[in-house]
Image (cartoon, grey):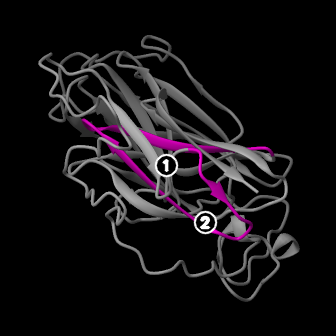
């Protein structure tokens, strides 16, 4: 499910309302979305990457906002863009990015969340970063330069060293063990206590993560890991996998929309090192649930 996005974003700084000369006299037609997105400046960094500065207008609407950036013109398909935030709803001036690919298209939007259920994305703007001093040769146009691409003439994601990604086995979006599918209440055997309806408005964030085997089950080297998650409302979801070798993100961050949740193939378990592994589900940067398994 997870697609790699080759973006090397080193620094992001935002200034609050009033940091830019000029002011908004009246609400724009785009209200409550942010509007007036515009590129102020672009430049080249010493390492051959590009940077740019952009400005936008917002109207202090909603709870917070996110900034989305992508190199792909695909409507910000989940897993193909970077999400930064949340930032205060009053943010409305400059944002500065460093470490972007040179000579590449960039698609940019501001996404405002009302704090309840609705998202208000701005119009998307497109521009091209400048050609910079260090020449980057990418023969297969996969975003991985030839000098670090193990398969320079076959496109593939960066996490697989630029080689074509292995094709995962056929899979369903449902859990064949519990019978759970997106849109249903979470399985009681994996998410105890999360089936009751919360009579609070707005309801608090809830979520659950599990794998196909029983909690704390053992996995051998090379064994397939299938993961499911459920959330009770629209939110930005991320799942991290903590192992003895380190922690990596196996899903997201991406906005989960109804029907909430899904099951997906998360890769093959790598042993050694052996030991406990922990899956953590985050909703809007808040840890909601964990699930454990062992590599042996």
**Quick check: 93 above or below 69?**
above
Say left or right for 3 vs 154: left
Residue bearing mark 1: 252
Q: Which residue is depicted at the point 74% across and 77% down?
A: 138
What percent of the width, then of the height, locates residue 256?
Answer: 32, 46
Residue bearing mark 2: 267
- In the rendered structure, does residue 104 fall within the stretch colored magenta? no
Nearer to me, 49 or 208: 208
Say left or right for 8 vs 1: right
What percent of the width, then of the height, locates residue 3?
Answer: 54, 64
The span shown in magenta is 216-244
Q: Which residue is depicted at the point 24% across and 19% down?
A: 61
Mark 2–mark 1 distance (CA, rounded to whole Å): 15 Å
Kindly report which numbered mark, 2 or 1, lies closer to the viewer in this rendering: 2
Q: Going from the N terminus, do you reach mark 2 or mark 1 first?
A: 1
Q: Which residue is depicted at the point 27% across and 44% down?
A: 186
Indicate the secondary structure of the residue bearing disc 1: strand
């Amino acid at each position: 499910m997870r697609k790699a996005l080759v973006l090397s974003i080193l620094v992001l700084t935002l200034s609050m309302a009033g940091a830019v000369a000029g002011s908004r006299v009246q609400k724009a037609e785009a209200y409550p979305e942010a509007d007036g997105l515009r590129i102020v400046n672009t430049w080249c960094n010493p390492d051959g990457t590009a940077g740019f500065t952009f400005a936008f207008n917002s109207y202090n609407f909603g709870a917070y906002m996110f900034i989305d950036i992508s190199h792909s013109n695909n409507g910000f398909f989940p897993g193909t863009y970077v999400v930064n935030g949340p930032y205060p709803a009053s943010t409305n001036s400059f944002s500065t990015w460093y470490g972007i690919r040179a000579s590449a298209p960039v698609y940019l939007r501001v996404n405002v969340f009302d704090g309840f259920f609705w998202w208000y994305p701005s119009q998307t703007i497109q521009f091209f970063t400048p050609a910079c001093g260090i020449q980057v040769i990418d023969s297969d146009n996969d975003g991985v330069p030839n000098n670090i691409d193990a398969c320079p003439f076959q496109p593939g994601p960066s996490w697989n060293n630029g080689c074509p990604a292995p094709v995962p086995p056929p899979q369903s979006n449902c859990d064949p063990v519990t019978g759970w599918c997106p849109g249903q209440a979470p399985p009681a055997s994996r998410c105890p206590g999360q089936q009751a309806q919360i009579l609070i408005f707005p309801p608090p964030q809830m979520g659950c993560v599990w794998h196909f085997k029983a909690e704390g089950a053992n996995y051998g080297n090379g064994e397939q890991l299938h993961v499911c998650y459920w959330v009770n409302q629209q939110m930005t979801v991320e799942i991290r996998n903590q192992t003895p070798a380190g922690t990596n993100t196996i899903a997201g961050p991406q906005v989960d929309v109804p029907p909430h949740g899904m099951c997906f193939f998360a890769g093959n378990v790598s042993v050694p090192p052996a030991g406990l592994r922990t899956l953590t589900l985050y909703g809007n940067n808040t840890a909601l649930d964990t699930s454990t398994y062992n590599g042996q």
